[in-house]
Amino acid sequence: MAGKRESYEGMMSKLEGIVSSMENGEMTLEDTMGNYEAGVALCNKLYKYLNEAEGKIKILSGDKEKDFPGNEE
């Protein structure tokens, strides 16, 4: 049985927690490196998630990109 896929929001929340804990500067070097590694892994998952979502949107929109009104420069 396949595991349930974690939500984008859940992964972002975890990443924000990692960043916050690293910013306080009270971790050991080993803990910081471990959190950095976990953060990079989460970033890779988030990147993949967003790429998959973009692909689905392109399929649903017929691969046509449109400008929104008022977006002219």
Image: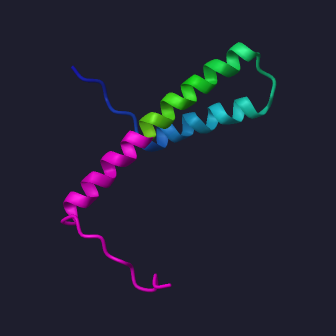
Closest to the observer, 11 or 51: 51
Furthest residue toward top:
30
Q: Residue at x 55, y 25 (%)?
A: 38
Q: Quadrant of residue 62?
A: bottom left
Q: Residue at x 43, y 42 (%)?
A: 47
Q: Which residues are magenta?
A: 47-73
Where is residue 11 shown, x and y percent of the image?
48, 37
User: Which color scheme did the rendering employ for the protein?
Assistant: rainbow
Q: Quadrant of residue 35?
A: top right
Furthest residue toward front:
73
Q: Quadrant of residue 67?
A: bottom left
Q: Residue at x 52, y 41 (%)?
A: 12
Residue 1 relative to residue 71: left or right: left
Query: Vertical placement of 35 versus 64: above or below?
Result: above
Residue 63 relative to residue 68: left or right: left
Q: Is residue 64 magenta?
A: yes
Question: How many dots with numbers?
Answer: 0
Where is residue 56 shown, x and y percent of the image?
25, 53
Q: Is residue 62 magenta?
A: yes
Where is residue 50 shown, x and y percent of the image?
39, 47
